[in-house]
Image (spheres, grey):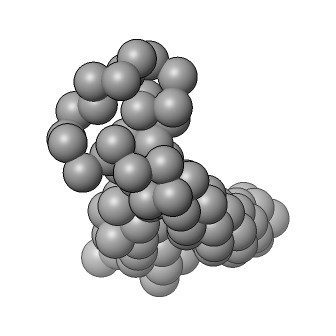
Amino acid sequence: MNNPNQDAIKAITTKMLLQRLAFMPGAIMVGLSLHTLFLAKGKPVFSILNNSILVYSMLIIGLVIMAIDQKQQITLAKEREKIKNGSNT
């Protein structure tokens, strides 16, 4: 029989993974925009990225998405650690 704490930890870990996948577009947007800004030298991966307004918008939106994701990941990690530490006492 599984310990309820183990089940809760597993549920939180699964939620963290699914959340990480849901926020993946933010990381992709940041990666594409940084590549276009610093490495592409006028030849971006996609021709639509020649528009500098689009590239800077992607960077800002992607960073906001990543910040939200990190805040939620930290909250879930703290909750998971609280459950782990509570089960050891």
Residue that appears at 44% across and 59% down: 54
Tell me if 35 is positioned left or right of 61 in this view. left
Is residue 24 visible from the viewing direction of this image? yes
| Rendered location of residue 12, percent (x, y) | 48, 73
Residue that appears at 41% across and 32% down: 36
Task: Decide which of 85, 19 is in the foreground and name it.
Answer: 19
- Give the number of callouts: 0
Identify whether 26 is placed above or below 35: below
| Rendered location of residue 15, percent (x, y) | 41, 74
Image quadrant in which the N terminus is located: bottom left
Is residue 87 visible from the viewing direction of this image? no
Task: Decide which of 68, 45 is in the foreground and name it.
Answer: 45
Tell me if 35 is positioned left or right of 73 in this view. left
Image quadrant in which the C terminus is located: bottom right
Identify whether 84 is placed above or below 51: below
| Rendered location of residue 30, percent (x, y) | 48, 47
Q: Residue furthest left?
A: 46
Q: Residue furthest right?
A: 89
Task: Decide which of 17, 51 is in the foreground and name it.
Answer: 51
Tell me if 26 is positioned left or right of 45 in this view. right
Residue that appears at 19% across and 41% down: 46
| Rendered location of residue 86, percent (x, y) | 75, 70
Which of the 4 quarters of the picture holds residue 7? bottom left
